[in-house]
Amino acid sequence: FVTTTFSRLGTGPDVITSPILDRLAVRFVSYPIGTVVGDATSPPTATGTISATPDSPVEGPWPGPRSGAVVFALMEDLVAADPHAEIVVDVIDHDGATIASGRRRVFTGIPAGELTIPVTTPAGDPERVRLRLETSDDTVVRLGIGDDGRPAVGRVELPPDTRVVLADGLTLVERTTSLPRIRWATDAVVVTDPDDRVAALAAGVADDTVVLSEPGPAAGAAPATLVVEEDDSERIVVTVDAPDPGHLVIADALDDVWTVRVDDVAIELVEADHGLVAVPLEAGEHRIELRHDRGSFRIGLALTLAGVVIVTALLLVGNDRDRLVRLAM
């Protein structure tokens, strides 16, 4: 499902680690309750059952490095009378300190099988996990145990360059390779064919390079100093001190309502990275102001509303005339 405004992405590791998302400055990706992207490892085969209650938490081994979620073997359907009941997992280090956590609401129940609970990425050296139940009733969580008598624990391994920063209801994963939304490109490559351009972006382009759809001014090799003075939904102001020519790249969608002035002179924006915004600049100090001009949008909306009023009036007049004709007959 894709429109010009919204995209629904897949959930595989190849999506969350895509270089295209880096260029779109996508820093965070959210996932629904109880899910996190990565390679999942099922818990070991259970050799028995252990119960966790609100008064009796249970502890199992930390399943391994880069775990974004722990996976338990839930031996029976979990149903709680308390609508606010939650399963909480604490990640414990060798000193007994809690260094990460995650929680999942029970809601209308969780069926027996694999119970996945995302956890935030630990800041220290994890040793074990503690599962506890927060509820006002006498709900019991029955988990499978391994040969060591502790809960059998699997995991979901996070893709490279990602970490879980929130595991409370939804899961929020940070992508640590995303580029700044407003950045300087010292180099430029031109790829005129759209399919080839997308393929090049998906394969990965150097961080300091912008992909252009049409030839533009030559660029230099030296980085520039950027100062973002203002950045909101309708106005962006950036000052640039550039030793060499280059492009100011902004990871916003290029459309007809953007206008740009460089040193108070209007210029045309350039398509960058297959649909983003770029401003070509010569060497020197510059002040760039971009505006999202909603005037044309308001005019279009006013004309649309006027058209609706006129059509409605014509329909009403037509209906009245039809009624008069029927009465005359």
Image: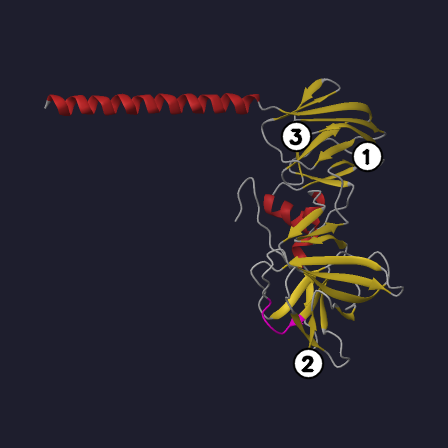
Residue stretch in magenta? 73-78
Height in image: 16 above or below 272?
Answer: below
- Callout 3 crowding tier (Cα within 10 Å): few <14, some 14–19, many ≥20: few
Say what amino acid the circle numbered 2 marks: Gly
Q: Are marks 1 and 2 in contact (CB under 8 Å)?
A: no
Nearer-the-camera pick, 285 or 3? 3
Question: Residue 231: image x %, image y %?
Answer: 72, 29
Residue 121, x across and y down, in percent:
78, 57
**Secondary structure found at label 2:** strand
Mark 2 vs mark 3: which is more N-terminal? 2
Q: Are marks 3 and 1 in contact (CB under 8 Å)?
A: no
The C terminus - image quarter: top left
In percent of width and height, residue 64 lies at: 79, 67
Whole-percent x, y for residue 187 in the image: 77, 38
Name the residue: 72% across, 23% down.
289
Q: Is residue 76 magenta?
A: yes
Residue that mark 2 sits on: 48
Q: Is residue 7 left or right of residue 145?
A: left
Image: 48 above or below 218:
below
Q: What SS does tag 1 mark?
A: loop
On residue 233, the disc is: 3
Q: Which residue occupies the extreme left position in the image?
A: 329
Which sits earlier in the primary sequence, circle 3 or circle 1? 1
Whether the residues at callouts 2 and 3 have beta carbons within 8 Å, the answer is: no
Mark 2 burial class by Cα count in 10 Å: few <14, some 14-19, many 20+? some
Residue ranking furthest to the right: 95
Where is residue 258, by image quadrant? top right
Q: Which residue is mark 1?
A: 220
Q: Name the residue rendered at 15%, 22% in the picture.
A: 325
**Mark nearer the viewer, 1 or 2:** 2
